[in-house]
Image: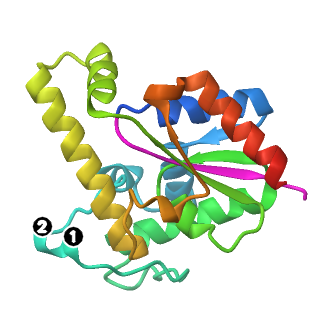
Amino acid sequence: MKNIVVTISRQYGSGGKTIGAMLAKDLGISCYSREILRMASEDSGINERLFGMSDEKIRRAGWFKILSRPYQGELIPPENKEFTSDDNLFNYQAKVIKELAEKESCVIVGRCADFILKDYPNVASVFIHADRDFCLQRSMERHSMTEKEMQKYIEKTDQYRGDFYRYHTGHEWADARNYDLCLNSGKLGFEKCVEEIKSYLKIRF
């Protein structure tokens, strides 16, 4: 198989993005996260700021988040009033993710990449999670917040990610059935998570 792509979904504070970067370095491939926003902006001509505002969260009213409009693959043309909607911002990110999966081996963090690439035989999807204390302690090391503020921030961020995933996929973000591999980074540590993913790739591909 020419290209192998690993998608990583992650709880806030679990270190999923770091694990993705470590895995990519070990494999000698690129790791994409927020870079996808820039690439989607360049492709669509839509201001990157709008992509940043909707990054893994739904910008619309709270009640809207309980709905779902699973991604179908279409793009909304510039003349349509919905051209800069959450749906179309996601569509362009999905377009970039598909193009990356088709042209190179890489690691893609977040942005429902597991769902977007669900029909690609060269993709392995991973969910990184950890218990509350691990996520809190690690997040406190990187941000100057009180413990109470940090816990609230973690819960809010994970809720954003869950709402975003549900809206664009119709599935639950933290449901293990959505992924090939679920790893507890708090118990394994980052290096062993990387080794587990690499072992899975060897068996699978």
Secondary structure of the residue carrying numbered label 2 = helix
Secondary structure of the residue carrying numbered label 1 = helix
Distance (Cα) linking label 1 and label 2 = 6 Å
Horizontal and vertical percent for residue 74? Answer: 53, 83
Residue at image position (90%, 56%) is 2
* 136 relative to 41, above or below: above
Segment tinted magenta in the rendering:
1-12
For residue 188, what is the image quadrant?
top right
Which mark is on residue 62? 2
* 95 relative to 126, above or below: below
Horizontal and vertical percent for residue 98? Answer: 66, 65
Q: Which amino acid lies under the numbered mark 2 shown in the image of this protein?
A: Gly
Horizontal and vertical percent for residue 100? Answer: 70, 56
Of 43 and 116, nearer the camera is: 116
Question: Around disc 1, counting alpha carbons within 10 Å, would you say few (fewer than 14), some (14 to 19), or many (20 or more)?
Answer: some
Q: Residue furthest right?
A: 1
For residue 95, what is the image quadrant?
bottom right
Residue 74, magenta (yes or no): no
For residue 67, what is the image quadrant?
bottom left
Q: Residue furthest front?
A: 187
Residue at image position (18%, 75%) is 64
Q: Is residue 98 visible?
A: yes
25 to the left or right of 108: right
Q: Is residue 93 visible?
A: no
Which mark is on residue 65? 1
Of 136 and 51, nearer the camera is: 136
